[in-house]
Image (spheres, rainbow, N blue to C red):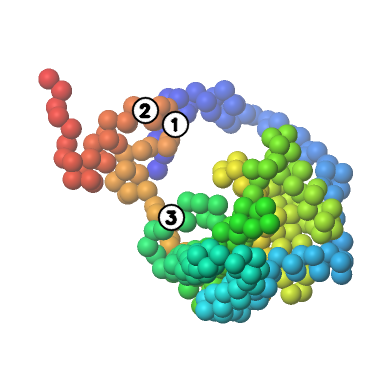
Amino acid sequence: MRRFTTRTLLFSLLLGLGAAPAIAAPKAAPKVTDTKEKAAPPKKAPPPVSAEGKKKLAELYAGFKFGMTKEDVLNVLRKQLDQKYEERIKATTDVTAQDRLRSEKKGEVARVSQSFVAFDGKRTGWDVSIIEDEFAHHTGEAMLERWENSNGKNQRRFFFFHDGKLYKMFVSLDVSILPEDKKNFETFAKVMQGQYGAGDVEPGLVTWRTDEFHVRAVDKLRTYDALGLVIEDPREKKALVALREAKAPPKKETNAVIKSVIDTDDSDHPNIKQNTGAIDAVIRAQEGGGSPPKKK
């Protein structure tokens, strides 16, 4: 129970609460405000994606399909590389150069296959990265990564799987070719909407929704100097979001001993810094560090 201190009493007297008045002053009638005037206007829903916009957005599939397994993805990749390298191999009669190209093709597939990671609780290099918000641990999620360095592009494609099935791809775009005055999300959003049509615009995010897929343009400039385009299966995403919430670890609570030391009642302890020494002692004791040395 909160103690009734001199400071509390003084505060009460200043408010006229120290003693009951003979005649209570009438309370002022609450001011009636027109809530309709202050209510924010409803957000306008973006127009539906046009047939042309949907066709262009679907190009982000890049030959892959939702529901593919890891091996399915690698097989499609092999076929794409066969076509890519066949032209280069035919373009030269140098046998050594042809062998080098064949070896290079195998190396590309091997690198993608070796990039596979299952998010099973072990910390990975991706936990703090451009895709850190795109997955969770202990939910049956996994990923493949591929550099797409062709036709002047220098971008990465991340393949996300749930229970072994492809449901999302994240394309990290190359922004190094953009001048500094154009390297911002506002410009990017305008360009994307010029290409795909109007989307649902939020801070750092533009979303286009169709029955078969959703596409997101995401801002990663501040944290990773990058921009991303994500195409995903909305049904699988909805189920996965619910699973992530169910599997999320409980939030850690402040140690009960430390709670007892920190008194948030400003009337008794107006400055928490006064307890700093006691708090440090408790923390050291909890960590096995023992008590602090006594002052001489």
Q: Quadrant of the N terminus?
A: top left
Please determine whether, in this image, residue 283 is positioned above or below residue 42.
above
Please determine whether, in this image, residue 267 is positioned above or below residue 192.
above
Q: Nearer the viewer, residue 20 or 137?
A: 137
> Of label 3 and label 2, which has the lower sequence position?
3
> Of label 2 and label 1, which has the lower sequence position?
1
Q: Which mark is residue 174?
A: none
Please determine whether, in this image, residue 48 is positioned above or below residue 257.
below
Q: In which quarter of the image is the C terminus?
A: top left
The residue lying furthest to the top in this view is 296
Answer few, some or many: residues within 10 Å of disc 3's Cα (few below 14, many 20 plus, some between 14 and 19): few
Residue appearing at x 39%, y 30% in the figure: 272
Which residue is denoted by mark 2 in the rendering? Answer: 273
Answer few, some or many: residues within 10 Å of disc 2's Cα (few below 14, many 20 plus, some between 14 and 19): few
Which residue is denoted by mark 3 in the rendering? Answer: 125
Number of numbered labels in the structure image: 3
Please determine whether, in this image, residue 228 is positioned above or below residue 85.
above
Q: How far apart are marks 2 and 1 (CA)?
A: 12 Å
Q: In this view, does 194 lie to the left or right of 155?
A: right
Kind of residue at disc 2: Lys
Kind of residue at disc 1: Asp
> Of label 3 and label 1, which has the lower sequence position?
3
Q: Which mark is residue 266?
A: 1
